[in-house]
Amino acid sequence: MNNLKKHFNQEAEAFDKQVLKNIPKYPEMLTALINAIPDKKEKPKILDLGCGTGNITKKVLERYPQAEITCLDLSENMIEIAKEKLSQYKTIKYIVGDFTKTDITEKYDAIISSLALHHIPTDEEKQEMYKAIYEALTDEGVFYNADVILGNSTYNEKLNNTVATQDMKKVGVTQEEINEHKQKRDDNDIPTTVYNHIQMLEKVGFKEIDIIWKYYANVVYGGTRKE
Ligand SMILES: C[S@@+](CC[C@H](N)C(=O)[O-])C[C@H]1O[C@@H](n2cnc3c(N)ncnc32)[C@H](O)[C@@H]1O
C-alpha cells in the first residue's frame, strides 16, 4: 500500500492531463457514472472512494449543487489538488485514508468510485470492499464504479489492449509513452473481469445490478441496496 501511495503522490500533479491521454473516453465514462446517481433527492449524501484530484466530485456537484460529499483518498497530494479545484464548495469533507481499512460509519445515498477499486489486490478483498460499501448505503442507495477491467478471454484481453493502444495513438501518445503507461499498469493495477464484479455484487446482496456503460476495458457498473 505504501508503494501505491507513493505512486499516486508522484502522479498527482500530472494526473488530470495524463488520464485524458491514457483513457481518451474518460469524460464519457465519468458522465455515465454521474448519470447513474438517481435524482430522488435534491441533497444526496455521497461518498467518492479514491477521489483523486476531485474530477468526479466536481461533476456530481455540477449536477447536484446541494449534495453533501465525502472525498476519501490515500494520497495527500491528490487530496490537496482536489481541495484547490473544489475550493468554491464549502461543504465537502476530505479524508486521507485507505478505503480498505477505513470504517465507513455514516450512511450514504450513493457511493461512487472511478479508476480506484482495481488497486485492491484480490477478488476476496474486492468482495469485502463491496460488503462494506453495501452496509454503508441507505435503503435504496446505489453504488456505481467506473473502472478498468480484465477481458474474460485471452482474445478479449488482447483486443482491449489493442484498442487502448490505437486510441492513445489517435490522441498523439507516443509508443514510448504507451510502453511507460503499460509498465505502470503492470506495476499497480489488479483488475478482474466484469463478470466477477457482477457475481461479487450479487453475493453481497446488491439488487438491480447493471452495466450502464462499457467500452472495451473500461466499464461503469453497480447496483442498489434494497431491503
Ligand atoms: C487513477 S486515480 C483516479 C482518481 C479519480 N477517482 C478519477 O477518476 O479522476 C486512483 C485514485 O485512487 C486512490 N486509491 C487507490 N487505492 C486506494 C485505497 N486503498 N484507499 C484510498 N484511495 C485509494 C489513489 O490514491 C488515486 O488518487
Image (spheres, helix red, strand yellow):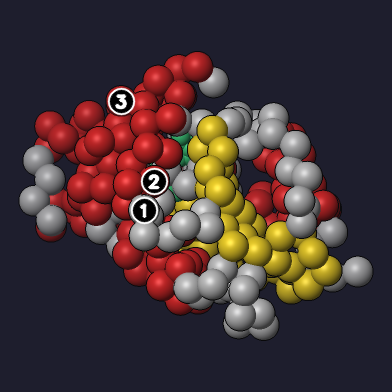
Q: Nearer the viewer, residue 42 or 157?
A: 42
Which is closer to the viewer, label 3 or label 2?
A: 2
Q: Nearer the viewer, residue 9 or 210?
A: 9
Disc 3 is placed on an element classified as: helix
Q: Nearer the viewer, residue 36 or 161?
A: 36
Amino acid type at mark 3: Gln
Q: Is residue 140 left or right of residue 121?
A: right
Separation of marks 3 and 1 at Cα, in angstroms: 22 Å
Separation of marks 3 and 2 at Cα, in angstroms: 17 Å
Q: Is residue 196 left or right of residue 221?
A: right
Q: Quadrant of residue 6?
A: top left
Q: Which residue is mark 2?
A: 83
Q: Position of residue 12 (x, y in %)?
A: 31, 35
Residue 87: give its label. Answer: 1
Amino acid type at mark 1: Ser
Residue at the far top: name it: 2
Q: Position of residue 9 (x, y in %)?
A: 36, 27
Q: 192 above or below 40? A: above
Residue depicted at x 56% and y 68%:
67
Q: Label 2 near label 3: C-beta < 8 Å? A: no
Residue depicted at x 22% and y 29%:
180
Q: Which residue is mark 3?
A: 10
Q: 86 above or below 82? A: below
Residue depicted at x 32% and y 64%:
27
Amino acid type at mark 2: Lys
Badge 2 residue CB within 8 Å of ligand 1: no
Label 1 environment density (alpha carbons within 10 Å; few <14, some 14–19, many ≥20) = few
Q: Is residue 21 left or right of residue 187?
A: left
